[in-house]
Amino acid sequence: MTNSIINASLAQLSQMLASKQVSSVELTQAFLTRIQQHNPTINAYIALDNEKTLAQAQAADARIAAGDAEALTGIPFAQKDIFCAKGWKTTCGSKMLANFVAPYDAHVISQFDAVGAVNLGKTNMDEFAMGSSNETSYFGGVKNPWDFDRVPGGSSGGSAAAVAARLCAAATGTDTGGSIRQPASLCGFTGLKPTYGLVSRYGMIAFASSLDQAGPMAKSAEDCALMMNVMAGFDARDSTSLDRPKEDYTRGLSAVTGSQPLKGLRVGLPKEYFATGLDAGVSKVVQDAIAEYRKLGAEMVDISLPNSQLSIPVYYVLAPAEASSNLSRYDGVRYGHRTAEYDDLLDMYMKSRAEGFGAEVKRRILIGTYVLSAGYYDAYYLKAQQIRRLIAQDFTEAFKQCDVIMGPTAPSTAFKAGEKADDPVAMYLQDVYTIATNLAGLPGMSIPAGFSNGLPVGLQIIGNYFDEARMLDVAHAYQQVTDWHQAMPKGIE
Amino acid sequence: MALNIEDIQRIAYLARIEINEQEAATTLTKLSGILGLIEQMQAVNTEGIAPMSHSQDLTQRLREDVVTQTNQREAFQAIAPLTESGLYLVPKVIE
């Protein structure tokens, strides 16, 4: 039973639940048992509450029995610990929130609850989503299920490892500069960062508000499409939520058939994404995937994103600036860590924040404070916002020549734990191919495209605004003729 | 823009984060590396380009001025570090 469950698609699980082959309680228990078995090693989950989880599964079974089931009713998901979930410890990977029990639900959580999905637990992450290896988590690193000496990527490292090790049916993540896509590449699964504004940020702990976006992390494009149907949608409680009609993200999948399902699709290959800095093994896998896309009928177009090398400098002004502002709320007064001994209010603030934040978070707050400080605003923040527009315009120009853009997701495969932990600049370069889409607000995804030295490699697909359905079709076409997305790490059966 | 230890201490004070001398020295090295990366921006001519804060260039929505939340003081104060009689306690700020 186990193998047919853990590698099943969401649609298959839904079918099994509908036909009473398995109950939600059995399905949930199967994953809880796997979590109990593997989580002590992998450290993907940092909060579990079997009682709450199984109560949701029982409710789902009742709903299925009553004939009131939706596509994801009864299916167990892992939730990144950045989403507030009422009654659940919600830490964002930080000592600052180590004892924070959320008093309300994030929009994403209530959307999953509303369809009767089951919350398996909260997953580990880089502290306040600041990192690309999960090593900045206060609760320790996460092991990459493909090689325990290596990192799963970050910041959604716990969700990534949980999906790869089949410790959930699928998971949620958030992506500010690549935090869904880079771990998807390093752990070998499908992850989608939607167009900015599609998924509400309400109750999602803020890092850089103009870039943060939640999305699905799952085995296949089809799974991601089903999750997008639940996650996306207008929410008045997020001031940047986009008020547009609901979409069915699965609508085009069944039409992806025949020998050349992508005939007429123009795929842009940005020359900047295949230049120096890209690992040769990764490059080979990506080229092979592109060759496969040609066979599916796609036409390749050489394009240029001339300002893409500026995306990292721009990001490391804008994201820390927004973070320094967002994280000023952690003052030890209303919630979060408060130091044990203090003289006056200022001393309480300074000690609480010094103790509650880890080194990387402090660095980013300091950079943000610096670039926003008197006399530097124009040289840094304003300049970065101007270049942000140039980066966005590059994509606008590119999409006149092509329908989607393809390239590598990350410059390398998973690296060893500790390898870059002491060198922030080297760590930041992990997101060299993903950050530009966040700055432009565009959707991006990563799909498994093969292996280099036994480690997964992701292919990135970038789409135009609101073009998620087409991107999912394009990914689905590839997953119809390849089985990289079904590969499982050894030793996790 | 080269930073020194005093700059780090000043920025940390602005950010309300206590920092000792040894931390300030380590931070100086790392921040200088990051600022070196950021300096690449200065080579770009951005004259006349409108700054972009959001991808969709949204305007803020307004809503009706009506009550949408109920009082949840007890739930919110249950997670506070220190409260008394429904108030958040902090060190004395007014002499």
Image (tube, helix red, strand yellow):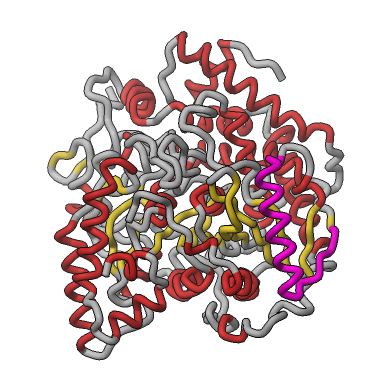
* Residue range highlighted in magenta: A278-302
**Residue in front for this viewpoint, A487 or A140:** A487
Is A427 located above or below residue A471 in the figure?
A: above
Q: How many discs mark residues in the rendered view?
A: 0
Q: Dividing the image into 4 quarters, which one contains the N terminus of chain A? A: bottom left
Q: Dividing the image into 4 quarters, which one contains the C terminus of chain A? A: bottom left
- Does A265 sit left or right of A138 as displayed? right
Q: Does the magenta stretch include residue A419?
A: no
Q: Which residue lies furthest to the bottom in this view?
A: A67
Point 49% across, 45% down: residue: A207
Residue A472 seen by the camera? no
**Residue in front for this viewpoint, A199 or A34:** A34
- Does B9 sit left or right of A433 as displayed? left
**Residue in front for this viewpoint, B26 or A190:** A190
Point 26% across, 53% down: residue: A35
Q: Which residue lies furthest to the top in this view?
A: B21
Is A149 located above or below residue A34 in the figure?
A: above
Q: Where is residue B64 in the image (x, y as percent from the top left)?
A: 45, 72
Q: Where is residue A132 in the image (x, y as percent from the top left)?
A: 52, 40
Q: Does the magenta stretch include residue A290?
A: yes
Is A61 located above or below residue A431 in the figure?
A: below
Q: Where is residue A95 in the image (x, y as percent from the top left)?
A: 32, 34
Q: Position of residue A428 (x, y in %)?
A: 60, 36
Residue B53 seen by the camera? yes
Prevalent SS, magenta region = helix
Point 79% across, 43% down: residue: A275
- Does A148 sit left or right of A190 as displayed? left
